[in-house]
Amino acid sequence: MNGISQEGWPLTLTRAFEKFPIANRELHHWLEGADPELAALIGSCRFPWDLLAINEHIVGKLEQTEIEGSVHPAAVIEGIISLGKGSRILPGVYIEGNVVIGENCKIGPNCYIRGNTSIGNNCHIGQSVEIKNSLILDRTNVGHLSYVGDSILGEGVNFGAGTNVSNLRHDGANHRSMTEEGLVDTGRRKFGVIVGDGVHTGIGTMIYPGRKIWPEMTTLPGAIVERDLRPD
């Protein structure tokens, strides 16, 4: 990822910034005819958490539901959804707000998806998972009984069952994150985790808010991620 440095961009080691997918379209496509606010957000993007604001803007401005997959009659959608070909929303799923879901995804059963959330292609969001205001890339699985809020999950990530992300400090202050420039205020009161491509978590992993996990890293069952996880 071409950010200010690899230090600040643990999501991928290979993907160029302009090719990063938001709502399943590369960023450079969104720049074409972008409104001034979106253009400013993209132009000022320096750190991976800035992508959350871009995602919120793009998904938040969806105006029309487009369903090419299948939605079970026992699912509830209260908002605007874009659902790709071959994707299935199973019974008990509740979608609140604007949500983009790519192709060949399986959502549910009994999931709660809210905020401005973007899910890529070939993803599986399992039984009783809650996803809030997050960006999830292709081929990523979030196992049952997990919570992901205000987070970015890269490609090919697998969250083991019961992996839970915290997104709020006890004092309610903005989250700070370590970069090569030092500790940086993210400007976000709600901020979960930045997860690189190919990360796997063991069941029952608990992740402190505002942490970053570098590509291909793993956790053991029951792990507590207190600090950024990166190669030695």
Image: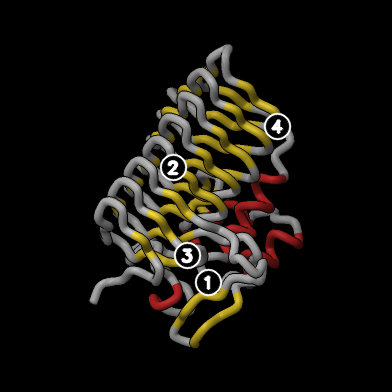
Q: Residue at x 43, y 35 (%)?
A: 125
Q: Answer with mark 2 or mark 4, whichever residue precedes in sequence.
A: 4
Circle 1 sits in a helix, a strand or a loop, which is it? loop
Q: Which amino acid does label 4 sit on?
A: Gly
In the rendered image, which quarter contains the N terminus? bottom left
Q: Which residue is drawn at 27% across and 51% down?
A: 221
What residue did someone put label 2 on?
A: 146
What residue did someone put label 1 on?
A: 47
Q: What residue type is labelled 3?
A: Phe
Q: Answer with mark 2 or mark 1, whichever residue precedes in sequence.
A: 1
Point out residue 180 in the picture as x, y percentages from the top left corner: 44, 85
What residue did someone put label 3 on?
A: 17
Note whether 211 is above or below 143 in the view shown. below
Q: Answer with mark 1 or mark 3, whichever residue precedes in sequence.
A: 3
Label 2 to label 4: alpha-carbon separation:
23 Å
Q: Which residue is drawn at 47% across and 79% down?
A: 178
Q: Give the numbered dot on residue 79.
A: 4
Q: Which amino acid does label 2 sit on?
A: Ser
